[in-house]
Amino acid sequence: MAKKSMIQREEKRTKLIEKYQEKRTKLKSLIKSINNFEKHIEVQKNLQKLPRNSLRCRNRNRCWMTGRSRGFYRDFGLSRHVFREMSHECLLPGIRKSSW
């Protein structure tokens, strides 16, 4: 189980991402369209003033059961430990243990 503080931090990041997403896209499109160098730098400074945690790449995928961030399967939203336990208990449809 992940620490509660880490899970809360991730939730805070997702809220920031949603809050600043529109503003960030507007500033990025402005940067692409501007030809004046001084104006370009001014808009980049405005973009840098946005919080770092509002970047989408700062968001981390976590298991919805345990909160574990490593060994994460996107298709199921589970970590490898929980995925293995649930597949052995036949809780995931269509998943079988392979043997060769």
Image (cartoon, grey):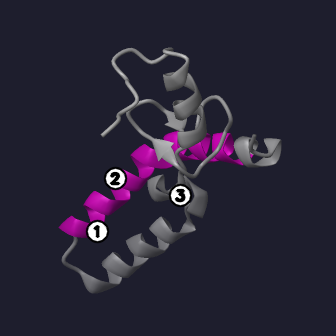
Circle 3: element type: helix
Measured along the vertical axis of the image, is residue 38 above or below residue 100? below
Q: How many marks?
A: 3
Do callouts 2 and 1 mark residues in contact (Cβ within 8 Å)?
no
Using the image as rendered, state which of residue 93 and residue 28 is in the foreground. 93
Residue marked by disc 1: 31
Residue marked by disc 3: 58
Q: Which residue is drawn at 65% across and 29% down?
A: 65
Rendered image quadrant of residue 74? top left
Q: Is residue 51 visible?
A: no
- Which comes sooner in the sequence, label 3 or label 1? 1
Residue range highlighted in magenta: 9-33
- Amino acid on which disc 2 is placed: Lys
Residue marked by disc 2: 26
- Amino acid on which disc 3 is placed: Arg
Q: Residues within 10 Å of mark 2 (few under 14, many from 20)?
A: few
Q: Position of residue 7 (x, y in %)?
A: 71, 42
- Which comes sooner in the sequence, label 2 or label 1? 2
